[in-house]
Image: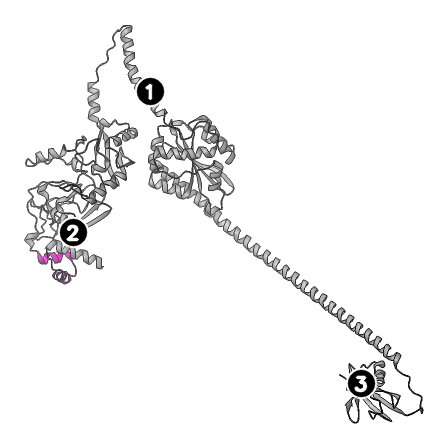
Amino acid sequence: MSENREEILADFQACTGVEDVAEAIMHLEETNWDLLRAVSRIMPPDTQSFHARQDPDVMIVENDSDIPTPNFKATSAEGAKDSSSNNIGHPPAKKREFSSLNSQDNFATASTSSGPSGASSGPSGASTGPSGASTGPKLLNFNIKYCDRELKFRLPDTASLNDLKLRIQTAVSVAACRQSLSSWARMQNYEKTPFSQLMLPTENDLVLTVKPHPDGMTADEESEVTQKLNGTYTLHVKYDNKIYDLKYQGIKTILQVKTDVYTLTSIPARHQIWSGWPPNIDDNTMLALSGITYPEHEVTVRKNLQIKEKEKRSMPEIVQVESDDDEFEDAADSFNVDDEYFVDNDNSARKQEPLIPENVEDELVGTVTFNERFTTRYGPIHPMFFQGTLEDALKEACNKPAKDRKILALYLHHDASVLTNVFCTQLLGFESIMQIIEKNFILWGWDITFESNRQKFHAALANCVGPAAPFSLRNIPVDRLPALVLIMKIRSATEIFNVVNGNVGVNELLSTLIECVEVYSEHQSVEVKEEAERAEREFVKWEQDEAYKASLEADRKKEETRLKLEREEKETKTRIANQVAESAAKREAHRQEVESRLPQEPPLGKGEQTKIRFRLPKGENVERRFTAETPLSVLLDFLIVKGYPTDEYKVISSWPRRDLTSLDTRQTLKELKLCPQETVILEER
């Protein structure tokens, strides 16, 4: 909304001349931002009425050279001068029909009918109702192209061309005196004429160019000219309801353009009538210095029918007369001149280097040579060719997952075809065709001018696609070449989908490629979905297999752990058993050794004796007699023999309580006061 109000504010200031922004906003606010009402508040009604026109109407024309001669005496000389200023020989052009306007009302007048009475404009061009009041100014839109920018201005029909130039000067800093608006009848007496008297349409498309500086070119202008000389121009040539898009370097001359158009239209350069070229140019003018719009420009060509009629009228009547042999020989010599001329042209054409040499052995070398020579001959503006064998190109396009597949396009070239140059430069160089090929196709090129290369291509195609594939290509006549063979893989079958011959236009080729892409995309989407589902199923199966493998691995490790524990436990038990057996064997050996040296129990009543009662750990009691002089070690040996070694058991005397194993074993029982009897207790340590 803010941008719209800024535009209304600018239009209000341009219409009324109010420079104070605050005052202008005040008037617009009071009228709720209604531009016509606000202008009516400032400008009196009589200043908004239209006066009688004294100047002729201004028409929007093709170019400066095509200005029709006005029907008034004052400017008839100027009109004649303008119409002859272009030395290319253009005829007067017709009025341009704007697509944005109704075909029955190409030029809107400044007057409008209003009121219920249906009153129309009078001679003065004013629009009046029953009361004769003015309806306010009409707003005109100006779309001006300048360099790479597009300027949009909105002015009332009370403004003039001078006001428009001042607005342009403010926007792009180009002085009004140096502004040149193409598609405009340039007459000085129109500079300050209100638009309402020029009968301009609501929408006006103009191109702004800068006139040369009187002191020479500035640095910026010199840089711009250098850029145009090194740049590429695209000429949209209209001929017989067809449009040819020709690309040229800025250093090419207009004569070279005419020569190429002769190749396309068969109209000799001397019979071509052009419209759309700037005035004051000739055939030797370079495109960059001609003043045409960069980088694209539209021109129209047609054949001069008047010259054809003159040739018919000036054709001498052929009378059959008798002649002798010498005269016939002279005539033959005269015809030989023309024959030599055409033979020379044919030889020069044949000297053109073929895209692929004859009898090429290596298919890879052939494709590399084809790409290099194609670029050299037709320029770099074309889709990229795949460099490799046909089998490699088929693998790159078709032998991939469905989502990554492309269509294989085989370009078959033939130098003998008259369609070759147009197909390579106009069709393959068309921007939309290049984009769709580079995005959806793998382009592989081959030259079948020589029969040996044709047979090699057929053999490679039969090997890659199938033996039936070459049969559909053998019968293509030379005059319908070049051709594009579209091959696609649907599921597991690789087949030829379509063959596009060279005798097609840009729109037909583009629609065929789009149709091919749409058909392939439908099948591709189905295959992509099936592959995704298949991949999902395989992933689920893989997960199950991995889970099963993990389960088996866990069971295997668990079993290994169990077996390892059992083995270790068994080994431990065996080791312990061995240790126990070994210790038992040692104890038994020690017991036997002690038993062998243990003295016999003394007979009852012999000498001084003591009776020792042993209370064993299990509650058993054992008694034995010892002599009073028996050392303590013998008593302990007796316990060892009974199976109670001193390292495992304590021998406790009752009174005083003491551990006999901790005493000196050399002391006698008497010394230890264990006589005449004593009870000792065995306790485990």
Q: Nearer the viewer, mark 3 or mark 1?
A: 3
Callout 1: few (<14), some (14-19), or many (20+) C-alpha neighbours within 10 Å?
few
Q: Is residue 465 visible?
A: no
Q: Nearer the viewer, mark 3 or mark 2?
A: 3
The picture quadrant where one finds residue 72 is top left
Q: Amino acid at mark 2?
A: Thr
First in sequence, mark 3 or 2: give its number: 2
Q: How many marks?
A: 3
Callout 3: few (<14), some (14-19), or many (20+) C-alpha neighbours within 10 Å?
few
Front-lying residue, 524 or 132: 524
Badge 3 is on which residue?
617
Badge 2 is on which residue?
170
Identify the secondary structure beneath mark 1. helix
Quadrant where the image shows the N terminus: bottom left
In the rendered view, tell whether residue 28 sits above or below residue 628: above
Q: Is residue 614 magenta?
A: no
Residue 172: percent from left, percent from top:
18, 49
- Residue 299 in the figure: left or right of residue 677: left
Callout 2: few (<14), some (14-19), or many (20+) C-alpha neighbours within 10 Å?
few
- Residue 445 in the figure: left or right of residue 72: right
Q: Amino acid at mark 1?
A: Val
Q: Is residue 520 visible?
A: yes
In the rendered view, tell whether residue 657 sits above or below residue 317: below
Badge 1 is on which residue?
343
Q: State which region is magenta.
A: 21-42
Residue 570: percent from left, percent from top:
74, 67
Identify the secondary structure beneath mark 3. loop
